């Protein structure tokens, strides 16, 4: 466990020293909140900002996860991984540390986005609701970072991975329930949106905001996260033996 | 119990044999594994550091089996790979402290300071690595490796890409570590450094160990003395018994003989009596380079480039 903390600490220091990366990662979700949440003339919900905020929070987490996927691959390419693997600490700690860091970094970013949303007029919730929202975002963060890390390790090449993450991020976002309620979607989009893992997280956050306990989405997220973690560990073991 | 023991250690990448039947014993010494590029040096180190599973054979490090008890091995060793991997956005102290935490040593802060002091980095410890020179970065990696006081230290090409002064410093540190009781297993292709600093060397070629022993023994056993003659005009081969012409380059001709001192006199007399204008003669002892060339032969870059093999090799080695 101590080594997981050490791995997370290392990445955290490295991240906070690259100021450009910290700020630029916040620009896109903030822009969505302001330009789409505030400015888009939509009629299908009462307060569109309240509707879109869960979607933007989950998108922030997704972007953080996808950009973090390359971290372990870089450690491998640059020779750090071999040094870590030759240490007496459990080898899986490298992977857990990385996934926890990516998720933690995503949570920091979503917190800032949440603060911006409140500043520009989203409704304030009670502490228990925020706790549940963080739980959902944490689960989704683990899910997306395990997924991204698996793909990056499997592709083993930065250009391919960058192309892959660019390719999937927009379609994933637009085919989720982030921007509009299911009721106004065309039939084909509704079908896709119901199967999109982003939607599970977004719907869960939305349920919480409306005062419900999102048992089903949380269970689905838990199962998906478990499956992806197992897959990620398999790929990790494969590339490290 | 020896620090490192291997029996018939073999590694195949597909059908490419990287290391074949390697049997070695290394104990409290600086052991240098020499060989041309792609000869299996790094593969050997990766197997001994449990980063790669051998295809056949066995090995132990400090009595722990490298396949069955990887964690036991890793508790006793430190490994510094070839590619300099230190975090440039972290300070020297942070880099070492990070490893101290990972090793779980007691009093990590003190241990880190100590390791930095040993590597003479204390005064720059709080600077970002970005500002370190190549030699300092390498020393920092050694400090990271020392923080848990390993019994065996594996260094893969520790002086590659460094200037002469930095190399010398690294080797002095390595020797000091050995004097403290550490076993150091190092790979290199700098013969002069191996000659000067290694207690014993093994020369590996295409996965096979072709020579093993202390550098002076190897030089004595594999090569004879070399006499070089500088002449005006061509130098004929006098065809004296026990003196073989190796070759000539411009006005310089080399001969090899069992006893160079005697051969030098005989050669000088014979050549002068035949009217050859000898300007200069010198006697030199064979260097480890000569041993290496004799053992390995002139390396042609492997005939035909098999892209598929190259790819599988790269994949497995990372």
Image (cartoon, coloured by chain):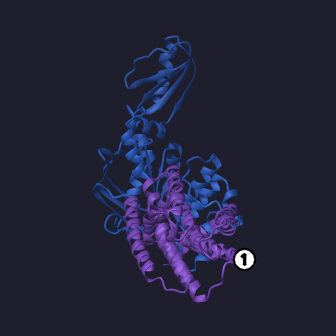
Chain colours: A purple, B blue
Q: Residue at x 49, y 21 (%)?
A: B248
Nearest the viewer among A204 and A17 is A204
Q: How many marks?
A: 1
Residue A86 seen: no
The quarter of the picture where the N terminus of chain B appears is bottom left
What secondary structure is found at the residue carrying circle 1? helix
Is B183 placed above or below B205 here?
below
Residue A176 placement, left or right of B116: left
Q: Quadrant of residue B291?
A: top left
Image spot of residue B116 (x, y percent): 63, 67
> Which quadrant would residue A108 be assigned to in this image?
bottom right
Say whether residue B149 is left or right of residue B74. Answer: right
Residue A85 percent across, percent down from the top left: 45, 64
Judge by depth and name the residue closer to the eye, A147 or B293. Answer: A147
Q: Nearer the viewer, residue A203 or A114?
A: A203
Callout 1: 10 Å neighbours few (<14), some, many (20+)?
few
Give above or below for B68 relative to B33.
below
> Which residue is tagged 1?
A119
Residue A56 horizontal side relative to residue B295, left or right: right
Asked if residue B21 shows in the view, the reply is yes
Whole-percent x, y for residue B254 in the image = 48, 25
Which residue is rendered at x = 32% and y = 45% of the image?
A: B17
Front residue of B1/A195: it is A195
Q: Is residue A50 shown above or below B150? A: below
């Amino acid at each position: 466990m101590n080594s997981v903390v050490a791995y997370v600490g290392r990445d955290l220091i490295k991240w906070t020293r690259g100021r450009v990366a910290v700020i630029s990662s916040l620009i896109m979700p903030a822009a969505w909140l302001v330009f789409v949440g505030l400015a888009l003339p939509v009629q299908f919900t009462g307060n569109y900002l309240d509707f879109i905020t869960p979607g933007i929070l989950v998108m922030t987490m997704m972007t953080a996860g996808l950009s973090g996927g390359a971290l372990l691959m870089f450690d491998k390419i640059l020779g750090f991984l071999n040094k870590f693997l030759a240490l007496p600490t459990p080898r899986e700690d490298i992977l857990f540390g990385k996934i926890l860091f990516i998720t933690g970094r995503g949570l920091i970013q979503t917190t800032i986005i949440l603060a911006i949303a409140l500043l520009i007029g989203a409704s304030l919730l009670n502490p228990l609701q925020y706790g549940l929202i963080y739980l959902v975002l944490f689960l989704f963060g683990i899910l997306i970072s395990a997924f991204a890390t698996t793909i990056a390790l499997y592709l083993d090449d930065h250009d391919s991975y960058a192309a892959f993450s660019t390719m999937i991020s927009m379609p994933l976002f637009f085919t989720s329930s982030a921007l509009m309620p299911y009721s106004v979607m065309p039939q084909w989009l509704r079908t896709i949106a119901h199967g999109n893992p982003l939607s599970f997280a977004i719907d869960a956050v939305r349920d919480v905001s409306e005062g419900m306990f999102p048992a089903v989405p949380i269970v689905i997220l838990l199962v998906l996260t478990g499956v992806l973690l197992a897959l990620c560990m398999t790929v990790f073991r494969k590339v490290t033996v | 119990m020896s620090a490192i023991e291997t029996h018939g250690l073999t590694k195949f990448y597909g059908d490419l044999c990287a290391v074949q039947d390697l049997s070695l014993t290394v104990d409290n010494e600086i052991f240098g594994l020499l060989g041309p590029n792609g000869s299996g040096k790094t593969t050997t180190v990766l197997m001994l550091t449990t980063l790669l599973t051998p295809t056949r054979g066995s090995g132990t490090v400090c009595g722990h089996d490298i396949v069955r008890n990887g964690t036991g091995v890793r508790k006793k060793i430190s490994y510094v790979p070839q590619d300099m991997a230190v975090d440039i956005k972290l300070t020297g102290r942070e880099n070492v402290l990070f490893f101290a935490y990972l090793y779980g040593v007691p009093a990590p802060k003190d241990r880190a300071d100590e390791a930095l002091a040993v590597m003479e980095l204390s005064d720059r410890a709080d600077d970002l690595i970005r500002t370190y020179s190549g030699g300092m970065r390498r020393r920092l990696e050694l400090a990271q490796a020392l923080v848990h006081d390993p019994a065996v230290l594996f260094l893969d090409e520790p002086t590659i890409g460094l200037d002469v002064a930095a190399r010398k410093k690294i080797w002095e540190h390595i020797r000091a570590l050995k004097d403290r009781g550490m076993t150091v297993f190092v790979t290199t292709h700098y013969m002069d450094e191996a000659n000067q600093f290694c207690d014993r060397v093994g020369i590996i070629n295409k996965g096979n160990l072709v020579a093993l022993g202390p550098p002076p023994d190897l030089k004595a056993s594999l090569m004879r003395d070399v006499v070089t003659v500088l002449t005006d005009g061509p130098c004929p081969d006098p065809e004296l018994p026990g003196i073989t012409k190796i070759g000539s380059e411009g006005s310089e001709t080399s001969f090899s003989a069992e006893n160079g001192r005697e051969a030098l006199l005989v050669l000088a007399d014979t050549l002068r009596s035949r009217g050859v204008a000898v300007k200069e003669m010198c006697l030199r002892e064979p260097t480890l380079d000569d041993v290496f060339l004799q053992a390995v032969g002139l390396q042609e870059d492997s005939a035909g480039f098999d892209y598929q093999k190259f790819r599988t090799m790269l994949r497995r080695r990372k």
